[in-house]
Amino acid sequence: MDWNTIAKAAQEAFREGVNEWIGKARIQGGQVNGPTAHLTPGSLVSDGNVESRVVQKLIGSQVPPEILRALAKELAAAWNGWAAGFQVKIPSAYPSFAAFPGSAAPATPAASGPVPLSNGSSAGEAGLKAPVLANRLGAAVRPYANKVSGGPADQALRNLAAWVDSSFAEWKSMAKLVGLQGKGPVPTFAPPYVPIGPVLRGDNLSAGPIFAGPRFGKVAI
């Protein structure tokens, strides 16, 4: 098994792992103040495990165990870094929370509609860029390079990193956040003198799948 074959196998394993992560993703936390929802870093999470899925996908292949685990770890770290740092502010998510007639607003669907994922940002996105990811993949497998014949790994890993980068850019440009809900207290509510007030220091959650759009993974034609 040469490096090109290993890189291709890792690509397909990562595609599967990321799409499973996307399917199991949810929103928890963030901030709600008045009508504004703010998904803060750490509020986008998933029950999917990219690293475990990549390892499971490759474990039956002929990829040396040390190499497949090193690739799985670095690929998962790049994806998880983006997810952990993701944030987006949605100014008109919950209009009724500007003046709510109660001591606490229950879980309420966002009125803003689907939110383009490209509206958000993440400091961790840098880890998915091809030059950065290629360097990290290369460093991770270098101690085990003698276990694979057929030349150096550099070009194969650059191709893998470029595919990850372009796949993420394509997916991010078309994916949308859906199913967002918000809830929270109304600290100034004090009837009969103050019968309404804004939701403050509330939080966000999600109902059902939170991503709408294409599957992750650029397909070469």
Image (spheres, grey):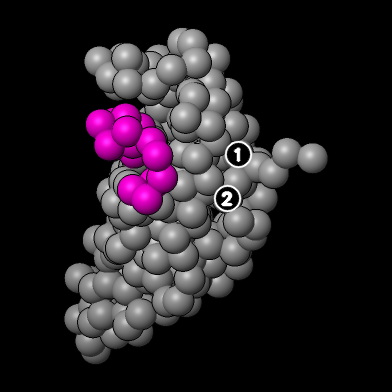
Q: CA distance from mark 2 to mark 1?
A: 6 Å
Name the foreground residue: 121 vs 58. 58
Q: Is residue 119 visible?
A: no
59 lies left or right of 212: left
Q: Is residue 207 visible?
A: yes
Q: Residues within 10 Å of mark 2 (few under 14, many from 20)?
A: many
Say what amino acid the circle numbered 2 marks. Answer: Phe
User: Residue sitting at 46 percent across and 45 percent down?
Assistant: 14
User: Whole-percent x and y of residue 71?
Assistant: 35, 32
Q: Residues within 10 Å of mark 1 (few under 14, many from 20)?
A: some
Above or below residue 20? Residue 57 is: above
Question: Does the residue at mark 2 contact the one at mark 1 (Cβ under 8 Å)?
Answer: yes
Magenta highlight on residue 134? no
User: Whole-percent x and y of residue 138?
Assistant: 38, 17
The stretch in magenta equals 58-72
Say what amino acid the circle numbered 1 marks. Answer: Ser
User: Whole-percent x and y of residue 83?
Assistant: 38, 45
94 lies left or right of 142: right
Q: Residue furthest right?
A: 221
In the rendered image, which residue does mark 1 sit on? 167
Name the foreground residue: 21 vs 3. 3
Magenta highlight on residue 65? yes
Which quadrant of the figure contains the C terminus?
top right
Based on the displayed image, in which of its 4 quarters is residue 195 positioned?
bottom left
Please tell me whether mark 1 sits on a helix, a strand or a loop.
helix
Q: Residue 216's mark? A: 2
Secondary structure mostly seen in the magenta stretch: helix
User: Residue sitting at 49 percent across and 54 percent down?
Assistant: 16
User: Residue sitting at 49 percent across and 24 percent down?
Assistant: 2
